[in-house]
Image (tube, rainbow, N blue to C red):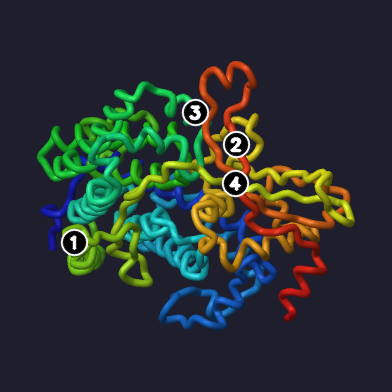
Amino acid sequence: MHWDWISAPEYWAGRLVLERLLAACYLLAFLAALHQFRALLGTNGLTPIPRFLRGTGFRHSPSVFHLHYSDRFFATIAAIGAVLAAITLLGLTERLPIWGFMAVWTVLWLLYLSIVNVGQVWYRFGWESLLLEAGFLAIFLGPADIAPPLPLLWAFCWLLFRVEFGAGLIKMRGDPCWRDLTCLYYHHETQPMPGPLSWYFHHLPRPLHKIEVLANHFAQLIVPFALFAPQPVADVAALIIIVTQLWLMVSGNFAWLNLVTITLVFATLSDAVLGRIPLLERPAELAEAPTWHAAVMLAVCALIVVLSYWPVRNLISKQQAMNRSFNKLHLGNTYGAFGGITRNRDELVIEGTDEDNPGPNTVWREYEFYGKPGDPSRRPRQIAPYHLRLDWLMWFAGISPRYAEGWLPQLVHKLLSNDDAALRLLRHNPFAANPPKFVRVRLYRYRFTTRAERRESGAWWARSYRREYLPAMSREEFEHRVSR
């Protein structure tokens, strides 16, 4: 049987760029898991996977770790994923026969699904589901010597539409500041993890902030419909989304959300735009997809149509939810972010002392994180597209103590014993020689300095003490409370 009617050779270059960028996202995800899991999820972590598995069955969290768990096994899984992602990023996977190509992408998806489904609070972000949904579709894209399947490119386009349009709708239905165009008076300062340019974005004239919001509404509420238009309209829409996502990348740190979104865009970019990229050497003739592959691909597209019922129902609902997975395979998800904007930035500051009896004159020294604000004189860093999971949860904990239940006291306990795994997640340990005798957590209100304050002090932040978040506690006191 001939399958020319589902082939889209004019999107050959876009398909390859999509595959390699998606492999880069997988690589970041597996490396982050490899580096951070022991402290967060390991056997002695803040929320241990073995404890989670004892209370959750395979049906509710499909994962290879239900078969076996050890920290060494988790590290092996993450390392295999990173190696396969690196091989794919280098373009080696696309040279395999179609069955080998599908096998590599299937393993990538299954391994990361296994991690996300036991990741608990550390993995409840929209970009995890987005990476998994895009990764599942990529299994059926085909290697470089086969023409891209048009129905699957439409599936990627539909995924991109849900990401963008869902984010636009949640804003219009959420915080009134999106409707009166004032949200960016606050957002650059109060976003989870500002970047090195966020201070400058925050100090743009307010009329420009309103233009930013208007541009965002246009990019998320109008442009996504043009993705389904004939060329060159779809190409123009794709380029607008890329520019918008790059703007977001330089104005803050949102892990690999922006990178995955840009990756999806390439499913809509034709060879008229991408065909001249010198690193992409197109074969003289593209082979026809095998019948079995075409049949499987069409079945997958039909599955996506069926699963789309839930995200579409969510999109048209007045009670639209953000970043929700309707099944444990993370397929057919709904997306959206920042339906509400915080007006103030409250940050947790963790301090320790080596004095035996802390008093009013005690010298407390601060722990520093890699990404979240701490020392007011330290400029915010560019972290994305990497994801610092502990830093992000610290931002949520500053909003409400309920976000810190179950893991913040455990973090304090580990700092009291200079736990190596926990300290590797921090930029600076002020007690490198010996553990502190007491650790406490305080809540501060942070704001960007004004231009005048910055000229005078050189500081990027100004902060004021609000209240005690967790009282000073010794290791013995903590263990006594836990044992009661």
Q: Quadrant of the N terminus?
A: bottom left
Element assignment for label 2: strand
Inter-mark Cα distance, 1 to 3? 36 Å
Counting from the top left corner in percent of width and height, residue 19 is at: 37, 48
Which residue type does callout 4 highlight?
A: Arg
Inter-mark Cα distance, 1 to 4? 39 Å
Instruction: State left or right for residue 441 relative to residue 237.
Output: right
Decide: is 245 above or below 330.
Answer: above
Q: Which residue is mark 4?
A: 466
Element assignment for label 4: strand
Neighbourhood count class around disc 3 (C-alpha, 10 Å): few under 14, some 14–19, many 20 upward: many
Can I make out residue 81 in this image? yes
* Residue 463 badge: 2
Element assignment for label 3: helix
Inter-mark Cα distance, 1 to 2? 40 Å
Instruction: State left or right for residue 293 relative to residue 185.
Output: left
Neighbourhood count class around disc 4 (C-alpha, 10 Å): few under 14, some 14–19, many 20 upward: few
Q: Which residue is mark 3?
A: 199
Q: Nearer the viewer, mark 3 or mark 4?
A: 4
Instruction: State left or right for residue 14 relative to residue 471.
Output: left
Inter-mark Cα distance, 2 to 4? 9 Å
